[in-house]
């Protein structure tokens, strides 16, 4: 592909197509609507299917149904729609159905300010749905990363049989940057499903750390999928000797593969005693502040989280051992900073928060590095 | 059909569908039941949902469908427990959302027969929005709505189809909300096949379900049943057999209804059984397939 | 076939004179029956009976079965089957 001036949301659409997404169901909501519009145009060209459902709850349900039917599926929304989707996100986590949910975060709570950005859904992405469940959330900081992390989201969701949230925001979603996307032929869609009947199939077998492959409906294994606690065959159960192994297996299936799931970028300076740690749009502020600081001769580490959930505990803990202060700029009141504090202690963390729709400024970060 | 059968089932000529000759060999029935599931079912003794399950598998058998080609998508509730017993591709989803999940599945697999199995609360309260939009789109899904006029699984709360003045656990002084006319709703929203019968008229249910499943469009079959355990007990309506007999006594065929005088029609309180709509409209997945062809051919 | 159903409870076959006698044979699967009495109460010739305290019906008038199939199409548990006799 040639270099194009492209919007973040558009790059998400192309990332989905490149990753083999062939079903999109969604509901318009600012600032995510471009994802839907682009896919409504591009999916039919590659034989994929697009539908605008009657609400976000139906959209989430439809992408799970289509995934069970064999298609890689995605939806896109923002805060209020993300709230509506939570019940069915929990269903996908419980039934272990691969799907990608794009949340282009906007200012909340409630209707908030649809055209302003925030990073206010960090905790919702982790715990928005009830009950203990694992989740993956990726946060791009640029238009190119919006493409790359969308491709990655599909890979991770298919491999680990889990919903994956693409936790972007109105700034990265609506900005335009020159990008050169890779040739789609070089991107191989993740293929982990059972697409042919061959021998016995145990849909939810409980070997520890196991991710049993998903057999598409209609392949020949006529099995049962439910949101109730279920045995390895998929039938609902109340037996503790079937519930406990499921809890163990599913809630540790990501932990056992963190090497593959955790993504972050580190720009470290030997001897630095201060670090700036951020993600999403705020990572751009962080990088700018880092450049200003280093230009003045100050040593500073810069860590950009590309995976927000599972939280990169080991990496952040190691960072806390190297530096005396970690500055965490984010466009909320400290949702990710909580996690950093949990790993390194509150004393070492300086929150730089802004939850009014405006970006954190580099000067705010520099001030937090000093004081 | 033999006269004695018609009379025994309370049906008029052509109102029912007799199962095929070999149906009653036990092995035919069992082919549709899951071999790795425990029976008898969890439903209360005498529950009409079991009767509907029998009608459903007889209808699928009548159509000669392969088990692999059938998907049952259920919501939450007693009725939604049906698919677990049946040897098809079964998806037990969240309350009220069966049609939305089924929409995604049908679009991914337009070649499969997708049947959504819902109770009255599931389909028409929490699921009401998805019900009308599935009908509007005319997507090739069969909506089997078992209407027992109550939320049975949770102990007997009133639903959008509970009769006026009926007692329920959340209507201890009598229900003051008028009920939905399920079939009228479906017709108005655009369903291309709409029919209603009762669990007393099981052979008529067989016929309507066969037609609905064969229909290429959004088809609705309302199977009027009863919950003697909750609603029946709270309203002193007797045993399961009593409530089944009441369905016979309080229902009227569409033919008979149409022969009533305008005054009698206006005063009618009986359940009208019949096929109310059977039209041909573009089916959603076919229309989208045509769109893909058009777009890939360079069209706009 | 699942192992779940018990041995069926089948009445002893009665000799069938030409053009008279039962048109159907009633077969009960007792372990699937929940004793709801729908078959007993609706059988037109009263082929089945169930006394209070009994778990499942008994075929008491096998000759009277007309194979109308009311019982087996209305049994919520598929616990009764009528086999058509020639």
Image (cartoon, rainbow, N blue to C red):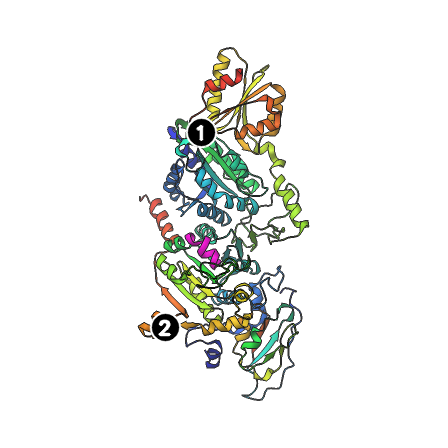
Q: Is residue A239 visible?
A: yes
The answer to whether residue B162 is above or below residue C85 is: above
From the top left corner, tell me how far across and down residue A30 is, in percent: 39, 37
- Classify 10 Å Cα crowding around label 1: few (below 14), some (14-19), many (20 and above): many
| Mark 2 belongs to chain | B
In the depicted view, which residue is nearer to us: A370 or A135? A370
Image quarter of residue A262: top right
Q: Which mark is residue A144?
A: 1
Q: Nearer the viewer, mark 2 or mark 1?
A: 2
Image quarter of residue A260: top right
Count of marks, rendered view: 2
**Quadrant into which the N terminus of chain A falls:** top left
**Which span of residues is magenta-colored?**
B115-130
Q: CA distance from mark 2 to mark 1?
A: 66 Å
From the top left corner, tell me how far across and down residue B98 is, in percent: 48, 53
| Labels 2 & 1 near each other (Cβ < 8 A) | no
Q: Is residue B23 visible?
A: no
The residue positioned 66% from the left and 44% from the top of the image is A207
| Mark 1 belongs to chain | A
The answer to whether residue B86 is above or below residue C73 is: above
From the top left corner, tell me how far across and down residue B99 is, in percent: 45, 53
* SS under mark 1: helix
- Classify 10 Å Cα crowding around label 2: few (below 14), some (14-19), many (20 and above): some
From the top left corner, tell me how far across and down residue A3 is, in percent: 39, 27
Q: Which residue is mark 2?
A: B257
**Magenta segment, prevailing SS (helix, strand or loop):** helix
């Amino acid at each position: 592909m040639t270099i194009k001036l492209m919007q973040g949301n558009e790059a998400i659409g192309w990332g989905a197509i490149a990753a083999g997404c062939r079903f999109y169901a969604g509901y318009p909501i600012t600032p995510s609507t471009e994802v839907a519009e682009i896919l409504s145009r591009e999916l039919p060209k590659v034989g994929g299917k697009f539908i605008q459902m009657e609400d976000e709850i139906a959209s989430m349900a439809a992408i799970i149904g289509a995934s069970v039917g064999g298609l890689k599926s995605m939806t896109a929304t923002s805060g209020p729609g993300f709230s509506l989707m939570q019940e069915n996100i929990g269903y996908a986590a419980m039934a272990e159905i691969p799907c990608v949910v794009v949340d282009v975060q906007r200012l909340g709570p409630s209707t908030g300010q649809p055209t302003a950005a925030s990073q206010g859904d960090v905790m919702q992405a982790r715990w928005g749905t009830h009950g203990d469940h694992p989740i993956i959330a990726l946060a791009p900081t640029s238009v190119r990363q919006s493409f790359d992390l969308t491709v990655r989201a599909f890979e991770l969701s298919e491999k680990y049989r889990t919903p994956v949230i693409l936790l972007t925001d109105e700034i990265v979603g609506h900005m335009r940057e020159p990008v050169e996307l890779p040739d789609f032929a070089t991107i191989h869609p993740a293929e982990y499903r059972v697409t042919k009947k061959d021998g016995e199939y145990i849909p939810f077998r409980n070997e520890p750390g196991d991710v049993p492959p998903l057999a598409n409906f209609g392949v020949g294994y006529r099995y049962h999928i439910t949101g109730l606690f279920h045995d390895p065959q998929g039938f609902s159960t109340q037996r503790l000797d079937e519930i406990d192994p499921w809890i163990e297996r599913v809630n540790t299936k990501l932990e056992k593969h963190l090497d593959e799931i955790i993504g972050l970028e580190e720009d470290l300076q030997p001897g630095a005693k201060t670090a700036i740690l951020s993600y999403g749009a705020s990572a751009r502020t962080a990088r700018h502040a880092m450049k200003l600081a280093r230009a003045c001769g100050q040593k500073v580490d810069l860590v950009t989280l590309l995976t927000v959930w599972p939280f990169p505990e080991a990496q952040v803990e190691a960072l806390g051992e190297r530096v005396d202060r970690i500055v965490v700029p984010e466009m909320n009141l400290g949702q990710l900073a909580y996690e950093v504090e949990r790993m390194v202690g509150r004393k070492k963390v300086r929150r730089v928060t802004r939850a009014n729709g405006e970006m954190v400024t580099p000067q705010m970060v520099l001030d937090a590095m000093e004081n | 059909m033999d006269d004695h059968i018609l009379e025994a089932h309370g049906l008029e000529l052509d109102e029912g569908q007799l199962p095929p000759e070999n149906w009653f060999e036990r092995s035919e029935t069992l082919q549709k039941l899951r071999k790795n599931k425990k029976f008898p079912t969890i439903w209360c003794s005498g529950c009409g949902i079991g009767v509907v399950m029998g009608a459903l598998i007889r209808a699928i058998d009548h159509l000669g469908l392969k088990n692999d080609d059938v998907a049952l998508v259920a919501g939450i509730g007693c009725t939604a427990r049906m698919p677990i017993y049946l040897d098809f591709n079964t998806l037990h989803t969240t309350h009220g959302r069966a049609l939305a999940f089924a929409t995604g599945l049908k679009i991914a697999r337009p070649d499969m027969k997708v049947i959504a199995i819902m109770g009255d609360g599931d389909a028409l309260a929490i699921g009401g929005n998805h019900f009308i939009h599935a009908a509007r789109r005319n997507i090739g899904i069969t909506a089997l709505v078992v209407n027992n006029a109550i939320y049975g699984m949770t102990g007997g709360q009133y639903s959008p189809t509970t009769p006026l003045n009926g007692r329920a656990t959340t209507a201890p002084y009598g229900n003051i909300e008028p009920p939905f006319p399920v079939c009228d709703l479906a017709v108005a929203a655009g369903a291309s096949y709409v029919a209603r019968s009762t669990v007393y008229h099981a052979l008529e249910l067989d016929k309507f379900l066969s037609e609905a499943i064969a229909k290429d469009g959004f088809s609705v079959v309302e199977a009027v049943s009863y919950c003697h355990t909750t609603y029946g007990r709270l309203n002193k309506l007797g045993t399961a057999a009593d409530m089944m007999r009441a369905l016979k006594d309080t229902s009227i065929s569409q033919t008979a209804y149409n022969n009533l005088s305008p005054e009698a029609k206006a005063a009618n309180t009986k359940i009208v059984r019949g096929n109310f709509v059977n039209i041909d409209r573009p089916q959603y997945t076919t229309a989208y397939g045509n769109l893909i062809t058009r777009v890939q051919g360079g069209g706009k | 076939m699942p192992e779940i159903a018990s041995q069926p409870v089948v009445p002893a076959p009665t000799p069938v004179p030409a053009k008279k006698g039962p048109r159907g044979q009633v077969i009960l699967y007792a372990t699937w029956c929940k004793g709801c009495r729908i078959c007993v109460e609706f059988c037109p010739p009263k082929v089945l009976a169930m006394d209070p305290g009994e778990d499942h019906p008994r075929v008491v008038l096998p000759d009277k079965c007309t194979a109308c199939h009311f019982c087996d199409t209305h049994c919520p548990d598929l616990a009764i089957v009528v086999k058509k006799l020639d």
